[in-house]
Amino acid sequence: MSRIKEILRTKSILIPGRQPGGGFQSLPLGLLAGETAVPFTVYLKIRPRGHPRPLYLQCCPKGEVFPRRWQARMQELKISRVYIRREESPQALPFVQQKFNEMLAAKARGNREKARWGYEAALLWLQHLFALERDHLSEELEIGFNLIENLYEIIMEEKDPGGLVLDLWRQEGLPAHGLHSCLLGLGFARYLGWQEKDVKALGFTALVHDVGLTEVPRAILEKPNPLTRIEKGLIQNHPRAGFTILWNSPVCRWQSLLTVMQHHENCDGSGYPERLKLRQIHPWARILRILDSFEAMVSTRHWRAARPPKEALWSLRRGWEKYRIYDPDYLSHFIKFLAGSRILGK
């Protein structure tokens, strides 16, 4: 106990840290507000002086209420996140979803605040999903579709969905990429005037479109050096792997399966895995190709910094003008969709 108090008094060795490391993943500190006992053990991420790597210090055992005084002190130190062990995410999921449902039901809460909680709930679910073995993945997909129902309602209430999505960017990595693409897809499909069921289906498809990458070794996905031919082949097989994983899911429509299979096809025939051309590619896949590219450009990668949204849109336009990679009609609409967002002026 005295060690924890010492840490909470010493700002210089506390680090908020956005990226979970090792076997830990982060949660927002605000999740622990109130008098509810947490069904998982809570840790602080710390970096003791002279230590080369961050450490994780247990600060609230499973089954206890997170002390208010610690929360207040952490807020003073601008520490916004705590950590749990990845193996406890199944216990954390219902807890986070319940908090999200309570937030949605609270009339006094603003749409942006609800969106932030929805972001956290969906991200935790994706992190959990992508850590599962293939045989257990399909069992979890209905939870993801229920999350889409709530995210859809939030997007429909938002006057500037593009700005909302870009404001929500909090994390990096494979699960976050799916979530960002999903939110962009919900906003863009709404902009296009689609029917509700199709907006939700596209959002769900974007949420899980890279599930096939769970079968590619992490060392290959994070490799800083050029990939070998075999390594490229493994990555380029992920659309087929995703199609296979999702095949038996009752929440996946045929359009969704085709979109997962084709989301890396380019309209000039230079994509993979089938080298299809514009008219051979499902319209949803043509949209997801744009969303996928834009999200990757405006997100940080371990080998480069994130691009500003306006620069990313220009890059997409140049990609069409020079190589005819993207569907020109959807690309034009997507640029108009984000052009009205206040965040492009930043």
Image (cartoon, rainbow, N blue to C red):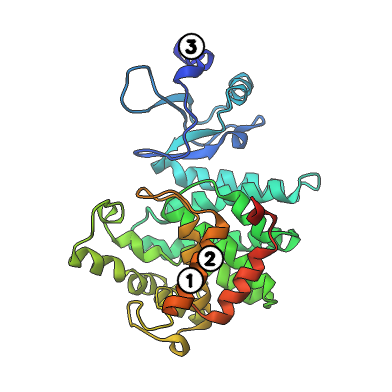
Which residue is located at x 45 percent, y 49 percent? Answer: 172
Dot 2 falls on a residue whose secondary structure is: helix
Depth check, mark 2 against mark 3: the one in front is 2
Residue 137 appearing in the image: yes
Mark 3 or mark 2, which is nearer the start of the sequence? 3
x then y, percent, for residue 327: 51, 80
Dot 1 falls on a residue whose secondary structure is: helix
Depth check, mark 3 against mark 1: the one in front is 1
Location of mark 1 (residue): 318
x then y, percent, for residue 2: 47, 10
Dot 3 falls on a residue whose secondary structure is: helix
Location of mark 3 (residue): 6
Residue 142 appearing in the image: no
The 10 Å Cα crowd at callout 2, few under 14, some 14 to 19, many 20 or more, is: few
Location of mark 2 (residue): 314
x then y, percent, for residue 290: 50, 70
